[in-house]
Image (spheres, rainbow, N blue to C red):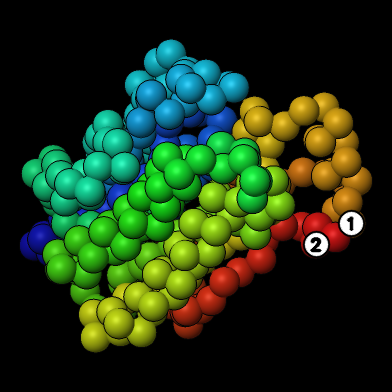
Amino acid sequence: MTNNDETRPVARPLALITGVGRTVGIGAGIARQLAASGWDIACTYWTPYDRRMAWGAESGATEAITEELAAHGAATAAIEADLMDPDAPSRVYDETERLLGPVTALVMCHAESVDSGLLDTTLESFDRHFAVNARATWLLIREYGLRFRATPGTGRIVALTSDHTVGNLPYGASKGALDRITLAAAHELAHLGVTANVINPGPVDTGWMSPEAREGLAGATPLGRLGTPRDTAHLVDFLCSPQGQWVNGQLLMSNGGLG
């Protein structure tokens, strides 16, 4: 006699990961790791942002990432979304739920990051940074809390931050706001059994570093190397696992001991 419970495939939980626009990015690294650990993956990307940055848009990136995730057995959905639009987070959740179902883990890797300082930051740039890095983070977490339907104790929120401020004022300031918004969720969503943590991965070279910066930053870490997307992905994977449940409401430095 066959035990249907033993033969029925175990449902994979779903992670929504924002900012998965390039194959070399931290978001893509996290998506690969979670897919390998048994998660289905919905991800957002916004090509116009990459297009106006020094590294440029990567042709075929979304398709390549999706194929890699599918090779790990993950059901996938890639959603183009401008997170400066206040309606984008709810639309992202609508599309994710329509295509794949309810979200168990929210991992936020999206960012607006254009260097400027105290004296040369424009109002437009300041507002854009806070709209993407802070407001969208709040709206994504709000949608997550309102729609959460997974088993209590399994929910996870993880956001990536930075402590860079000098010469990068709007980015650093808006990431500081992201920290507080995310850490508040550890307490305000406690009734759902959800944990919320922030990771500062330190400098990870995903195509934005000059050779001089790469050498200097590598030399400032005890291990003499730069961080990689995989380094961050391993920590996110742990936080999203059952073993990571007791780590909650923390801002975690995962920068190789950068001095």
- Locate residue 13, reporting x and y percent: 27, 57
Residue at coordinates 66% horizontally, 66% vertically from top-left?
253
Q: How packed is label 2: few (under 14 Cα within 10 Å), some, or many (20 or more)?
A: few
Question: Viewer-proximal residue, 241 or 156?
Answer: 156
The residue at 86%/31% (across/down) is 212
In primary-sequence order, the first of circles 1 and 2 is 1
Q: Is residue 121 above or below residue 8?
A: above
Q: Residues within 10 Å of mark 1 (few under 14, many from 20)?
A: few
Say above or below: 113 vs 199: above
Q: Nearer the viewer, residue 185 or 223?
A: 185
Question: Which picture quadrant has residue 3?
Answer: bottom left
The residue labelled by disc 1 is 222
The residue under the point 39% across, 78% down is 184
Looking at the image, the residue that sits furthest to the top is: 59
Q: What is the C-alpha distance between the residues marked 1 and 2?
A: 6 Å
Image quadrant containing the C terminus = bottom right
